């Protein structure tokens, strides 16, 4: 097979089964739509021998059987458990394993019933490398995924990525039982697991430490007992804590480079230690008492001062709605930041003025070289073109202070040379983007919330 032919076949390797599709288009979202077995045969023929990315919206048994015959080519398989009956699922995974090349990713969405026995057998025989599962604890259980004795005990032995999302449920006993099954899967896959995503597991979870030996990417969103997941190899962490760590303890992530933090309604200052942290993305400020995540109030010389428990070089803050005085106090301790992004933020003049003041006892972000600001309406009393003029003057003052000319009275050591200042104006300020300073060598990284 020539390289060009292989690439052409790859273009037809995305297949979506949807027997109820009534549109006229043959392709939706980069997938070829198959409503009948004949259309599925056509798509499979066009894909050659390429690995398949499959999404099942709805299907009949005949199409599921046909797709099973190509199971050795499955690469990614996604289906909504609430939309396909057990008979279709059995046909998809039944009649023994045909998967000589193991599926890399299985995505089970909206699991409002238990998976079929054939799915369980498929997992035991084929051992997926990645599993993503959206579960309804109040409607079914996870017993089919249990790690049991015998041949099925190794079903998770090559699992590399595991994602488990719990939908809301008041059935606390069932949620606790399911959470224990999740823990057993994590422990069974400990030697191979490199990425772990857990969301909305709010029952008492992981009451003792869970060592994540090889996990490098960790996501813990609204997970009770999140602090017991110990990852000494974690380099990327997304954290929306269910609660503060009991006993005023702190968690050490010795290899952490990137932290994406969702601010809660409780104090987390000094709770995370990460000596290698490079990037801190900070979401939803305004409700957390006791300062910001990076602040260590116990380390300050006076009660009004703090020192930084975290020292990132890049800081991105979304929805900055705190008092500007609190923001100033918090930023005073971040002396290592070289790049800062403020998105969807109501930054007032009271904050921007000190950014241009090099004579403060604790200058704000003295090493800053790149600044990107996305202004939101309501940041000040002045709106429209008049407000834009006011803010333009403030940003020009920041440029003058941080990139002084030869006649400036500022000492060079007070601020690093600012290279890039970009402002994205709100609609109320007539929109658009202004580059007060532009440096093409600055990496065009965007930290917008998806």
Image (spheres, helix red, strand yellow):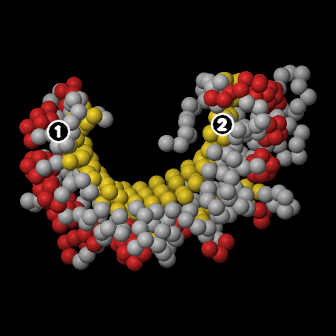
In the picture provided, is 254 more to the left or to the right than 335? left
Name which residue lies at 40% across and 63% down.
166
Quarter of the picture holding the N terminus: top left
Q: Position of residue 122 (x, y in %)?
A: 18, 61
> Which one is nearer the viewer's eye here, 8 or 214?
8
Can I make out residue 439 in this image?
A: no
Indicate the quadrant where residue 98 lies.
bottom left
Most extreme residue toward the top is 406
Provide the secondary structure element on which disc 2 rests.
loop
Q: Which residue is mark 2?
A: 376
In the picture provided, is 119 more to the left or to the right than 414? left
Q: Which mark is residue 34?
A: 1
Indicate the quadrant where residue 431 lies.
top right
In the picture provided, is 380 more to the left or to the right than 89? right
Number of other residues with Cα within 10 Å of mark 2, as a class: few under 14, some 14 to 19, many 20 or more:
many
Q: Which mark is residue 310?
A: none
Indicate the quadrant where residue 406 lies.
top right
In the rendered image of this protein, does residue 9 appear above or below residue 447? above
Q: Position of residue 256 (x, y in %)?
A: 56, 55
Name which residue lies at 68% across and 27% down.
429
> Which one is nearer the viewer's eye here, 281 or 425?
425
Can I make out residue 99 in this image?
A: yes
Q: Position of residue 86 (x, y in %)?
A: 17, 60
Name which residue lies at 81% across and 60% down.
300
Number of other residues with Cα within 10 Å of mark 1, as a class: few under 14, some 14 to 19, many 20 or more:
many
In the rendered image of this protein, does residue 156 appear above or below residue 40? below
Provide the secondary structure element on which disc 1 rests.
strand
**Mark 2 or 1, nearer chain start:** 1
Q: Position of residue 243 (x, y in %)?
A: 58, 67
In the rendered image of this protein, does residue 207 appear above or below residue 218? below
In the picture provided, is 197 more to the left or to the right than 439? left
Question: How far apart in space, not on screen, are marks 2 and 1 (Cα)?
Answer: 44 Å
């Amino acid at each position: 097979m020539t390289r060009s032919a292989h690439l052409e076949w790859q273009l037809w390797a995305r297949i979506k089964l949807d027997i109820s599709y009534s549109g006229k288009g043959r392709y939706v979202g980069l997938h070829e739509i198959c409503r009948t077995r004949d259309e599925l045969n056509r798509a499979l023929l066009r894909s050659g021998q390429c690995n398949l990315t499959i999404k099942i919206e709805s299907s009949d048994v005949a199409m599921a059987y046909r797709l099973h015959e190509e199971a050795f080519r499955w690469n990614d398989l996604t289906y909504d458990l609430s939309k396909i009956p057990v008979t279709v699922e059995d046909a998809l995974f039944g009649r023994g394993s045909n998967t000589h090349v193991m599926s890399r990713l299985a995505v089970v969405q909206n699991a409002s019933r238990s998976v079929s026995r054939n799915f369980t057998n498929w997992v035991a025989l084929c051992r997926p490398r990645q599993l993503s599962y959206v579960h309804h604890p109040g409607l079914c259980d996870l017993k089919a995924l249990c790690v049991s004795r015998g041949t099925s005990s190794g079903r998770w032995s090559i699992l590399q990525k595991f994602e488990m999302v719990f939908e809301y449920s008041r059935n606390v006993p069932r949620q606790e039982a399911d959470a224990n099954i999740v823990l057993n899967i994590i422990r069974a896959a400990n030697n191979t697991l490199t990425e772990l995503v857990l969301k909305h597991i709010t029952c008492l979870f992981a009451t003792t430490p869970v060592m994540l030996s090889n996990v490098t990417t960790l996501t813990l969103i609204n997970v009770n007992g999140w602090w017991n997941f110990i990852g000494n190899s974690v380099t990327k962490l997304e954290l929306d804590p269910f609660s503060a760590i009991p006993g005023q303890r702190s968690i050490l992530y010795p290899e952490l480079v990137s932290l994406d933090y969702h601010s809660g309604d409780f104090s987390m200052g000094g709770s995370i230690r990460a000596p290698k942290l490079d990037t801190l993305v900070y979401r939803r400020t305004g409700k957390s008492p006791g300062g910001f995540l990076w602040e260590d109030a116990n380390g300050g010389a006076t009660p009004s001062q703090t020192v930084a428990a975290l020292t990132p070089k890049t800081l991105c803050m979304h929805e900055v709605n705190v008092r500007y005085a609190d923001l100033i106090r918090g930023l005073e301790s971040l002396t290592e930041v070289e790049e800062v992004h403020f998105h969807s933020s109501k930054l007032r003049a009271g904050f921007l003025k000190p950014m241009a003041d090099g004579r403060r006892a604790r200058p704000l972000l003295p090493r800053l070289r790149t600044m990107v600001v996305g202004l939101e309406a309501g940041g000040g009393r002045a709106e429209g073109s008049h407000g834009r003029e006011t803010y333009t003057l403030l940003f020009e003052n920041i440029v003058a202070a941080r990139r002084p000319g030869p006649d400036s009275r500022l000492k060079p050591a007070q601020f690093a040379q600012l290279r890039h200042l970009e402002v994205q104006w709100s609609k109320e300020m007539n929109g658009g983007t202004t580059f007060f300073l532009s440096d093409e060598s600055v990496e065009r990284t965007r930290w917008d919330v998806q």
